[in-house]
Each structure stands twice: as structure tokens, then as C-alpha cells.
Image (cartoon, rainbow, N blue to C red):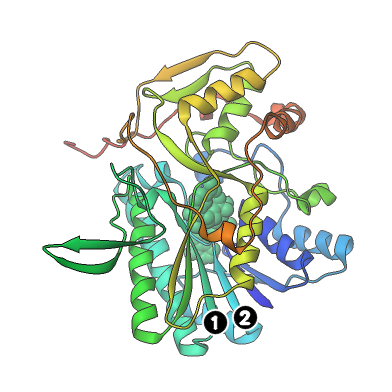
Amino acid sequence: MRVLVLGGDGYLGWPTALHLSDCGHEVAVLDNFARRRYDEELGSQSLVPIEDLKVRVAAWKEVSGKEIPMYVGDLLDADFLYRAVREFEPEAIIHFGEQRAAPYSMIDREHAVYTQHNNVIGNLNVMYAIAEINPEIHLVKLGTMGEYGTPNIDIEEGWIEIEHNGRKDRMLYPKKAGSFYHLTKVHDSHNIEFGCRIWGMRATDLNQGIVYGQQTEQTTRDPRLATRFDYDAVFGTVLNRFVIQAALGQPLTVYGKGGQTRGMLDIRDTVECLRLAVENPAERGEFRVFNQMTESFSVKQLAELVADTYPGPVQIDYLENPRWELEEHYYNVKHTGLLELGLKPHLLSDTLIESLFPIVEENKHRVDMEKLFPSVKWSSAKNA
Ligand code: NAD
């Protein structure tokens, strides 16, 4: 199939492009390098050095013999996006291309507005490009498990049947997001579901859990193919950050009581979930939702797991929680859709955690210790 990967220079977009190309699909990537600019703005960098997109694409050609055309530009530029879609003629568009850090969206008004504008308008442009150029294109959109929040009832896969005053209906599952970033994903989901109803779009919304790990079968074939490994308190995801803290002899920083429980998955499962979603498209008019996660862990459990796996002593510190979130709560998520399509999960094991320590060891001279501590408070708006 012909697949256009939006956000194809990012942590997950790049390995997904490689995986699909390796599986025989014709893949192109589109990106405006916004993520690289956030690094410059925040003075942070990926722990593992990453090459420019041009070098990555050339390295993949050398290693595999396969071409990955690049479209460099902004999803907010509808003319550019339409040109890319007309020229590449994708059968599926995978949309990773959004600002994805909750703390970044909570820095101040400017960052909240940027995040909502970039994500919601970018996604709307993608929807219109599909509707106007070729409504057969399957949109595979990355959402997040954070859209649901932590309700005191089971979390269903996108939809819920509700009985109210003796009548029943199938409704979108209620959302209670925990940041202005997570809210952009809620808005996107609603916009896409509407597009499925009015234009007969075919869409898969992947409510993804927190991703850990840094290597896939394809990225390890050449160091130039490496993907990002973020550790800072703004973009670093929690398990990756704990591994780095342990390896550097720093305390693991758990926010609040650490009972916050989240769905998670291995980066090797992310790329495989994307393949499964693309190869098994939603029907015309269908808004299909999968909860893309394989296991749930509390932050405290993760910290203990990393501490137990690391060969040396590890301290766990409980910091004042900079976020607004429940620290003890019910969490039971249905996630059978991708398993039914054939996903064989890599569950979190000591081996995976152990495999991350040498990566840290090799790159530890690149770590800026200050960046490990939270710098953004959810309550930072004036008078809040
Ligand atoms: P990332 O920031 O590494 O990648 C996103 C890419 O999109 C970047 O390369 C960025 O430059 C690009 N981009 C952003 N805005 C753009 C625009 N307007 N035009 C063109 N390109 C643009 O993020 P990631 O970790 O790879 O996440 C990818 C997607 O998966 C995101 O939508 C994110 O919300 C979702 N997700 C990620 C995780 C996770 O743990 N990493 C968890 C759940 C959901």
C-alpha cells in the first residue's frame, strides 16, 4: 500500500515509516521539523544523537535499497499538504504530526494556544485534504489514552452503550483530558468522527498509551537510523526518564504519591499496531477506535521496576506533583481491538529495561541534569 506518514521525522513516525517500508509498503514522510525546534527553544536534546531527515532517508536507501520520499512543510499550510497528497496519492495517511508534550502545552498561554492551533487546525487540514482529494484514503490518527482521563468506571474502546431514562444509544466514550495537549486529541477525535458521518471518511483513532523503548528491528540496522530518546521533564516519557536517572545515579523522580496508573506499550508494538491498522482499513463512514496499549502500570510500580532491575543502588524521590491528576484511582481499560487484528505484544520485561542501560551509558555525556526536574506547573496561570 501507499502510506504517507505525517510527523515522519519524530520519535514514533520515523521507526513506523521504516517498519512499513521494510514490510513492502510504499512510504513517504512529511514533517516541518517543529520537534527539532522545541529542542532549541527548551535547550534540550535527544539522549541518542539523531541524524537529519535527509541523512536518515539516504541511510535507509543504502541499507534496504528502498526509497522514502520526503515532504518538508507544515500541516497548517493547506496548499503544501494538498500538493503532497495529490503527488504521492496515498491509500492511507498516518497522522503523528502534532505537538505531543502535555507539559509543553501547559507552559503558558502562548504554548497552549500554539498546541491547540497546531494540532486541531493541522488535523482539520488533513481531513479536508482527504475529503476533497480522495475520500477513499484511510486516516489513521494518533490519539492518546489521556483523552479518557481516569474515570471511576471501565474505559471502553472509544464507544459506549448508554441507557438513560429507559432509552439506549451508542455514544462516544466521555472524555476528561488532563492538559491542553490532551484536549487537542479530544477535539481531533470529535472532528474526525464528524467527518466520518458527513463525508463518509474512513478513520481509525488510535488512543495510544505511553510509549517506552528506543529501538526497533529496523532502527538498529545502522546508527544513522536511530530515533529520539527523550529524557527531559517536558518531552521525556516516564519509563525512559527513570532508566536514565537510574543509570546516572540520580534519584527517580515520582510525582506525588505515584499511584497514577497509565496504559503503556513498547515502541516495537507501536510500529506493529500501525501496520495492522493500515493493512486492515476501517470501512467508509466508520470511526473506528482502538486503545493502543498492552499493559497498565502505576508510576510508582515503574520506578520500583527500574530500581529492581538496575544493578546498582537506586533512590526513589517523591516530588510535589506539578500536574493536576488523581494520584490514586480506578483504572481498567478494554484493549482487545488490536489483539484481534493479530498484535503479539512485547510485555515490559527486565530484558527490555536492561537493554536501555547501555544506550544511556554510551550517551551519558549528553545529559543535562537540570532538565530531569519538572519545570512546568499546571497551576501556573495567573491567579489559578
Ligand atoms: P514527536 O514530537 O517526536 O513527533 C511528532 C512529529 O510531528 C515531529 O517530528 C514534529 O516535527 C512533527 N510535527 C508537529 N507539528 C507539525 C506540523 N504542523 N506540520 C508538520 N509536522 C509537524 O512525537 P512522538 O512521540 O513521535 O508522537 C507521535 C504522535 O503519537 C503524536 O501525535 C503523539 O501525540 C502521539 N502519542 C505519542 C505517545 C508517546 O509516548 N510518544 C503516546 C501517545 C500518543
Q: Quadrant of the N terminus?
A: bottom right
Q: Is residue 69 left or right of residue 249?
A: right
The answer to the question of whether label 2 and label 1 lie on touching residues, with beta carbons closer than 8 A, is yes
Looking at this rendering, what residue extends furthest in the top direction?
Answer: 313
Residue 21 in which image quadrant: bottom right
Task: Report the number of numbered marks.
Answer: 2
Circle 2 SS class: loop
- Tell me if mark 1 has few (under 14), some (14-19) or many (20+) residues whose alpha carbon lies within 10 angstroms of its own: many
Query: Where is 196 relative to 143, above or below?
Result: below
* Residue plotted at (88% across, 60% down): 63
**Given the image, on which type of amino acid does mark 1 rest?**
Ile
Question: Which residue is disc 1 drawn over?
Answer: 137
The reply to whether residue 54 is visible in this rendering is yes
Residue 148, percent from left and from top = 35, 51
Q: Quadrant of the C terminus?
A: top left
Circle 1 SS class: loop
Looking at this rendering, what residue extends furthest in the left direction?
Answer: 165
Question: Which residue is disc 2 drawn over?
Answer: 90
* Residue plotted at (63% across, 65% down): 276
Query: Where is 184 relative to 329, above or below?
Result: below
Q: Is residue 154 left or right of residue 97?
A: left
Distance of label 2 from label 1 (alpha carbons): 7 Å
Residue 327 in which image quadrant: top left
**Given the image, on which type of amino acid does mark 2 rest?**
Pro
213 or 39: nearer the viewer: 213
Q: Earlier in the sequence, mark 2 or mark 1?
A: 2
243 or 49: nearer the viewer: 243
Q: Is residue 66 left or right of residue 350?
A: right
16 or 37: nearer the viewer: 16
